Image (tube, rainbow, N blue to C red):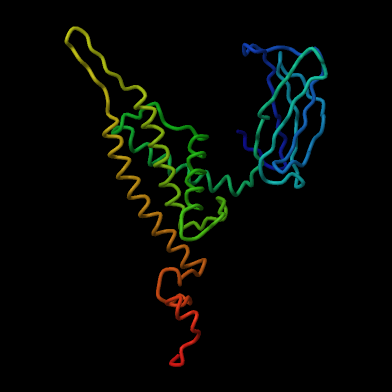
Amino acid sequence: MRIIYRSQNERIFADFKDENGVSVQPSGSIYVTIQYQDGTTMMSNVLATHYLAGRYFVQIAPDITWQYGYYGAWWRCDNSDLQVTQDIPNVFKIENRSESIIKGVMAERVRSMLYMHSDMGGFANKYPRDREILDYLQESLNWWNAHPPAVTFHNFMDVPESYYAIIEEGAVIKALIALGIYEAGKHFAYSDNGLSLTRDRSGKYQAMYAGLFQNYILSLKAMRTKYALDHVHARGMFSSTTGFPRSLSRALRGTSKFA
């Protein structure tokens, strides 16, 4: 998925292919409609520009009227003999530059932590790409928002800097799990004339992940509790200062005459 910023010219491309995945050149004109994630149409039936065989583009220059968020580009041909079905549009995101900087800072630290495992876990030549690391960071941010006791709806710009580390750690765990699954997929068992060879390290992976996951959950819980106490003022949830009655019978009786 492409990241686009306001006040700069960008080209959105589309490729027309047949059922075998071979590029085809439509005989008619190509039009594109771009919509925002809430259904608002930003460009309607704009004539696309021919680039290569079966490849077209439309140029956009998002200004302040283009909100931050996700957009989809839908393409159509005015030639009736070419049937085009687009179940999923070309999706791109217009993002605040400040948010991209924060994500870039986190991604650099996540990448550094993953590279530490290159000589230990056999992950050479299988490092996650930037797009994958950003996906792991987003999953970790969702993890942060969903974990009790406080309910938050943070994006990357809202998270206090002191909590960056816990989100980065969650992204590392997500990445290591993905790399472990990739590695486990190459395990095999081979037998030939009494000679047997088995390559299966899934048990070791599982033991490592279990320890990492347990430690991370403890750290995440501690961080979320601290955040709740500092920002949500939910102190009564964790101490005896709660204002709720000590028992239902006392609540029904009302205030004690000894109060």
**Frontmost residue, 225 versus 117:** 225
Residue for point 58% across, 48% down: 99
114 shown above or below 17: below
Outermost residue toward the top in this view: 193
Question: Which part of the image, by quadrant, shows the C terminus?
Answer: bottom left
Outermost residue toward the left in this view: 194
79 shown above or below 4: above
Residue for point 70% across, 18% down: 55
Q: Quadrant of residue 5?
A: top right
Outermost residue toward the bottom in this view: 258
Residue for point 38% across, 38% down: 114
Q: Is residue 102 left or right of residue 27?
A: left
Question: Which part of the image, by quadrant, shows the N terminus?
Answer: top right
Q: Residue 211, how many percent across, how many down?
A: 30, 45
Q: Residue 109, how many percent across, how many down?
A: 43, 44
Residue for point 18% across, 12% down: 195
**Frontmost residue, 177 versus 169:** 177
Q: How many labels sit on residues?
A: 0
169 shown above or below 119: below
Q: Residue 100, how many percent across, how many down?
A: 58, 45
Q: Is residue 21 left or right of residue 228?
A: right
Q: Is residue 143 left or right of residue 192?
A: right
